[in-house]
Image (cartoon, rainbow, N blue to C red):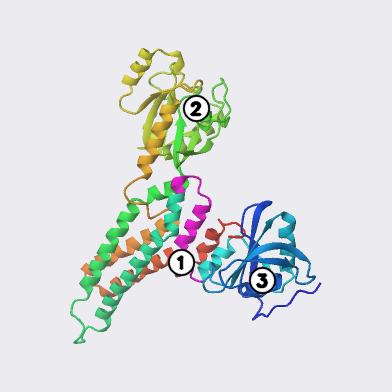
């Protein structure tokens, strides 16, 4: 069957018009089919018989352009470039959300020359290429799509509104002003209308920006943690109820529970939404001396993950020796809480005695079997997350890539200030250019081809 011909300027990847389902999984009440590219308007006109007024929904009968068969009755919208989400001509058809309906419309669209199904993230990538979004907003959009908790949603939405991108662009514009001062000092040293000392104002700007970026980097761990979630490791000797505690908190059988010591061999992860904050709970192998190779590997992994955790819950039971405490290499300077499990077999006096002997760390007496004391532990965990994630200012950095670009910027600015003190104007100019380029890479203005595939790989088809 011959393809339907639409007016085209050329055939190729950049000239393709793309389409995809941009709403949820089928079947659904409504299915939104999005079309973007130079032939979007012609395709919409062929489907519904006319081109609607821009940005106004119209009710229309959708027909197969080749057979004139009615496919559905839908709402259609037209967004001419550049005032569209992708910056290209763009159309949306809001169909009834049946699989057969969407399949019929896709079949009709495939008949047009130069049209194809979109790749994952391609709509967002075109928005980037047409200057509608910078990379920090695109990363935030991906984070918003995958946000599991209220705190993650709030952080992602702030960054979609330009929390980091706008700040980085202001820094870059300020750097351009400093670079102009230094270049003038280098190129026009003897001109009468050029001030004699242009280097020092540029160095003052560089020093101020360097300080601002240092402060931003100081809080970068918090933003990245909120995106990924706090990590809490349940560690301790074998057979003290670590897996039972994990199951009690998760409210499901996430880990195998057995009276036999050494049942847990690998690290088990459970992701939780704790009062709006993301938390990853780790159940680790019982830590003890063992000659069994598989258990040894489990213990090694337990120590490694616990050492990287934000908080270690060191669990013992009433039969444990007091010497079975968390070693310094296990907690690695992170927060440590001591927990005595199976306290349903102890008297209140015995529990209080244990509490008094562990005054150096927060202490909880619980029973994973009955649930006694677990609610108090969960309240404390929620408060720990709240204090960690709720400072006065929202975090500007949420990804490792962003942190690395700011570290490059800060390093170049620091070197520029140092070289300026030695009067080396040419080197100062070069370091300021390097700082400006790093900020350009942060927002996606220059030289970012090497990271684009990784960033857009987070997206699904239709976004």
Q: Residue at the spot x=50%, y=53% of the render?
A: 144
Give whichever of discs 1 and 3 has the lower sequence position. Answer: 3
Q: Choose between 360 and 254: the one closer to the eye.
A: 254
Circle number at residue 44: 3
Magenta span includes 144: yes
Name the side, left or right, on which 192 lies relative to 356: left
Can residue 330 be seen? Answer: no
- Which residue has dot 1 on it? 444
Against 273, residue 407 (above or below) is below
Q: Residue at the spot x=76%, y=74% of the render?
A: 3
* Alpha carbons under labels 1 and 2: distance apart: 45 Å
Give whichever of discs 2 and 3 has the lower sequence position. Answer: 3
Name the side, left or right, on which 20 lies relative to 276: right
Task: Tell me where the magenta segment starts and ends, as one range.
Answer: 130-152
Q: Residue at the spot x=35%, y=13% of the render?
A: 349
Q: Secondary structure at mark 2?
A: helix
Query: In the rendering, at what x and y percent does residue 427 appear?
Result: 29, 72
Against 300, residue 259 (above or below) is above
To which quarter of the image does residue 54 belong?
Answer: bottom right
Query: In the rendering, at what x and y percent does residue 337 appear?
Result: 38, 30
């Amino acid at each position: 069957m011959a393809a339907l011909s639409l007016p085209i300027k050329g055939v190729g990847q950049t000239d393709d018009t793309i389409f995809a389902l941009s709403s949820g999984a089928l079947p659904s009440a409504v299915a939104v089919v999005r079309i973007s590219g130079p032939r979007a308007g012609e395709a919409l006109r062929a489907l519904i018989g006319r081109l609607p007024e821009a940005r106004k929904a119209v009710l229309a009968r959708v027909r197969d352009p080749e057979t004139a068969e009615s496919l559905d009755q839908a709402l259609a919208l037209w967004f001419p470039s550049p005032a569209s989400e992708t910056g290209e001509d763009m159309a949306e058809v809001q169909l009834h959300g049946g699989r057969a309906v969407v399949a019929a419309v896709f079949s009709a669209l495939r008949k047009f020359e130069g049209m194809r199904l979109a790749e994952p993230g391609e709509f967002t990538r075109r928005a980037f290429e047409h200057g509608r979004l910078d990379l920090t907003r695109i990363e935030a959009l991906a984070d918003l799509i995958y946000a599991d908790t209220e705190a993650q949603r709030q952080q992602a939405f702030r960054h979609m509104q330009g929390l980091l991108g706008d700040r980085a662009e202001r820094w870059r514009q300020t750097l351009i002003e400093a670079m102009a001062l230094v270049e003038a000092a280098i190129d026009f040293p003897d001109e009468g209308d050029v001030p004699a000392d242009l280097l020092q104002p540029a160095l003052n700007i560089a020093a101020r920006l360097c300080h601002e970026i240092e402060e931003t980097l100081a809080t970068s761990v918090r933003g990245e943690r909120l995106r990924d979630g706090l990590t809490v490791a349940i560690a301790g000797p074998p057979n003290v109820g670590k897996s039972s505690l994990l199951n009690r908190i998760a409210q499901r059988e996430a880990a195998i529970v057995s009276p036999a010591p050494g049942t847990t061999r690998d690290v088990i992860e459970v992701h939780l939404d704790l009062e709006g904050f993301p938390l990853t709970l780790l159940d680790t192998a019982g830590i003890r001396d063992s000659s069994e190779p598989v258990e040894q590997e489990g213990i090694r992994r337990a120590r490694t993950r616990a050492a990287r955790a934000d908080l270690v819950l060191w669990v013992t039971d009433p039969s444990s020796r007091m010497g079975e405490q968390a070693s310094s290499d296990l907690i690695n300077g992170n927060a440590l809480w001591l927990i005595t499990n199976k306290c349903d077999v102890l008297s209140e006096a015995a529990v209080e005695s244990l509490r008094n002997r562990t005054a150096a760390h927060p202490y909880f007496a619980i029973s994973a079997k009955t649930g006694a004391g677990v609610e108090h532990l969960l309240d404390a965990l929620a408060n720990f997350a709240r204090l960690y994630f709720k400072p006065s200012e929202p975090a500007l950095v949420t990804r490792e890539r962003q942190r690395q670009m700011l570290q490059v910027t800060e390093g170049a600015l620091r070197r520029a200030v140092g070289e300026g003190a030695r009067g080396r104007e040419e080197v100062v100019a070069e370091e300021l250019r390097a700082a400006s380029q790093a900020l350009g890479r942060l927002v996606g203005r220059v030289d970012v081809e090497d990271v684009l595939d990784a960033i857009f790989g987070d997206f699904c088809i239709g976004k």
